[in-house]
Amino acid sequence: MLFGGGQLAWLWSQRLHFGTWVPAGGTICFVVLLVWLRLDGRWRQKYWLLLLLTGMMTIGPMVGAIIVRTHLGLTFEYDGLAKDEVAIDRLLHGQQIYGINWQGTQVDGYSYVFGGLETRHFNHLPLTVLAGVPIRLLTAAVGIPFDYRMVLICFVVGGIAAVSRLPATYQVRFMVTCALMLNPALATIGVTGHDDIMYVVAVVAGLALLARRHNVPACLAFGFSAALKPFGALAMPLALIILYRQWKQTTIFPRRQAILCLVALAAPSILSILPFLLWNPGAFWRDVVLFTNGGIPDAYPISGFGLSGLLVALGIFRPSDYFPFGVFQLAGLAPLFWIALRVLPIRPTLGRFIAFYSAAFFAFAFLARFFAHNYVATLVALACCVLPLAGIPFQSSELAPGQLHDMPSDDLSAA
């Protein structure tokens, strides 16, 4: 109720960007779901109704904003969306996307951001751009304007499919869907074009696959999450801990599977980053690494809700200063992953996995050069998944692969 009501309030306040039909349809579906929730049981039906509500309140605003944009142009969209779209077009024409000047493109409309920094650097990893290429080609083939939110819609649908594959009851899936897809902190920034949902979906997909012992595809999903944004890489050590525990339970160490898993973890980043790194290593290093971590005169300013913002507020640093925050990040992550190594194998549950991932996410973001609002939104969404998944164990050799899935969907003690 809290999440749905908050998102509805935002939809009504921003209805000029995607039409009145979106909040109106969402309100009707929301009221129907509230009435349905008063009935005992029937969580399968409630879950499917929730997915309909997700379509109305999360995908609907994106579709509406795409339609309105064809008449009004960019209005309330995130500057990263504008750059991703230009980068995709440049890539399709064989042009570089790093180390270039973005003036003269639609990114010019965001020259007010930090004195025009956004027109001089592109700090997104290549897979963020590559993921949009197939959809850009498809829209060109059918003759409709491309909008990067079309890519995000595909990931939202993929996220729903990933949650639906969790070895959990429908009630648990209901709560996780609310946390990720109807969270006004995360879902609303997706409407403006923020791409955080992409690596979050990849992490959830990896978790669902790992929970069902589909180890190589799970590692591939975690690999894609890391290739989309560095936050995704924080799930890799936790996945390796779960995998090592599984492998220790076998009589013969599965060396071939272990090699495939390691390759799957690394392949997405290597295959997507290496060509651009070889194409122009200096430009890639300046845009992706130095711009976000400091080391160049026009680096992203020290700011945000974390330690860095506090130090600026106290006058210890100026926003343009350089400081190796990466040392703090490593110092914060090392003990956390050491605790995970000791604790997670004792009682490995999906909830503990997400709890450690959320803690690592917080440490990494809080101690970084900047802690942006979209990171806070993602952290809130992840933290809300911990309790629903707390009792769901990873399937082990003592648990048949289909055992959890076959339990009655309305059983709260599914684990």
Image (cartoon, helix red, strand yellow):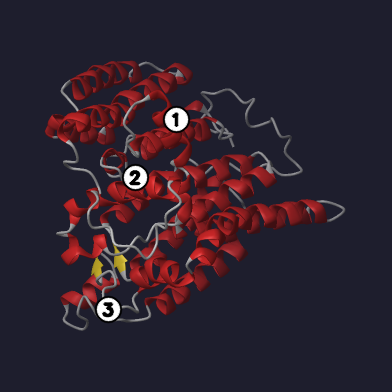
Q: Which residue is mark 1?
A: 138
Q: Nearer the viewer, residue 106 or 378?
A: 106
Residue 346 in sight:
no
- On screen, residue 207 above or below 33: below
Residue 243 spot, x, y in % from top left: 68, 53
Residue 80 spot, x, y in % from top left: 30, 51
Residue 293 spot, x, y in % from top left: 36, 72
Task: Count numbered badges in the picture.
Answer: 3
Q: Amino acid at mark 1?
A: Leu
- Residue at 30%, 46% (x, y): give it: 81
Q: Which residue is mark 2?
A: 85
Q: Amino acid at mark 3?
A: Pro
Residue farthest toward the right in the current orientation of the protein: 252
Image quadrant of residue 289? bottom left
Mark sitting earlier along the chain (1/2): 2
- Residue at 37%, 77% (x, y): give it: 325
- Residue at 39%, 39% (x, y): give it: 180
Q: Nearer the viewer, residue 414 or 180?
A: 180
Q: Would residue 115 appear left or right of 177 to someone viewing this image?
A: left
- In terms of secondary structure, where does tag 2 sit? helix
Mark sitting earlier along the chain (2/3): 2
Image quadrant of residue 57? top left
Q: Amino acid at mark 2?
A: Glu
- On screen, residue 395 above or below 55: below
Q: Which residue is mark 3?
A: 297
Q: Estimate how packed mark 1 is, as few (under 14), some (14 to 19) or many (20 or more) residues with alpha carbons within 10 Å.
A: few
